[in-house]
Amino acid sequence: MYDIFLSYMNKSENTFKYRQLLSCKCLRMRKASRITTQLYDKKLKPLKIRITQFSILSLLASGGNETVNSLSETLLMDRTTLSRGLDILYKYKLIENLKSKDARKRIVKLTPKGFETLDQAIPLWKEAEDEIFGESKKYGFSAL
């Protein structure tokens, strides 16, 4: 009987030990980030772009032509992830490459269709912004 009790206590302690890991701040922030991303993606779906591509379009529209390396650094994205996003934007003819004196540098610019898509996306993005802000105020995150 005592062995059963010890076994139960050990299991109970282990359960608590691992359950407390669920309060990990990084885990919670990543979960919140995924929920936020899903909301923006849902809003932008009619335009067949995701928030990651919207961010690229926004950066190019506001800052002009960029190299892939500078986009990667500014967006804090690894080049592989960025390349996947750029490929979709190329496919829809929202961006194009510019010729560079240095063949090792790839310079990207927004096309007229890219500006048009971004203009159509801004009201959808604004809806998501307002929704996120409204929800975050409920939980005391109004500083966002």
Image (cartoon, grey):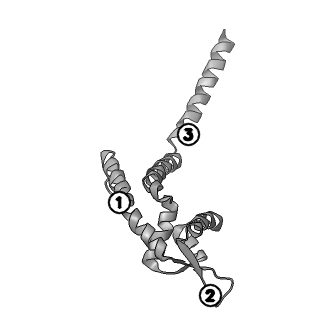
Q: What is the CA distance from the residue labelled 1 to the residue labelled 3?
A: 35 Å
Q: Which mark is residue 126?
A: 1
> Would you place residue 62 above or below residue 24 in this image?
below
Q: Quadrant of residue 121?
A: bottom left
Q: Is residue 6 left or right of residue 114?
A: right
Residue 125 in the image, given as x and y percentages of width and height: 39, 59
Q: Residue at x 62, y 87 (%)?
A: 100
Q: Identify which amino acid the numbered label 2 is placed on.
A: Ser
Q: Are marks 1 and 3 in contact (CB under 8 Å)?
A: no
Q: Residue at x 64, y 91 (%)?
A: 101
Q: Nearer the viewer, residue 14 or 53?
A: 53
The residue carrying mark 2 is 100
Q: Is residue 141 left or right of residue 17?
A: left
Q: Are marks 1 and 2 in contact (CB under 8 Å)?
A: no
Earlier residue among tags 1 and 2: 2
Give the secondary structure at mark 1: helix
Residue 115 in the image, given as x and y percentages of width and height: 44, 73
Quadrant, the C terminus: bottom left
Q: Identify which amino acid the numbered label 3 is placed on.
A: Leu
Q: Which mark is residue 74?
A: none
Q: Identify which amino acid the numbered label 1 is placed on.
A: Lys
Give the secondary structure at mark 2: loop
> Would you place residue 2 above or below residue 68 in this image?
above
Label 1 environment density (alpha carbons within 10 Å; few <14, some 14–19, many ≥20): few
The residue carrying mark 3 is 21
Quadrant, the N terminus: top right
Q: What is the CA distance from the residue labelled 3 to the residue labelled 2?
A: 50 Å
Q: Nearer the viewer, residue 86 or 104?
A: 86
Q: Nearer the viewer, mark 3 or mark 2?
A: 2
Residue positioned most to the bottom: 101
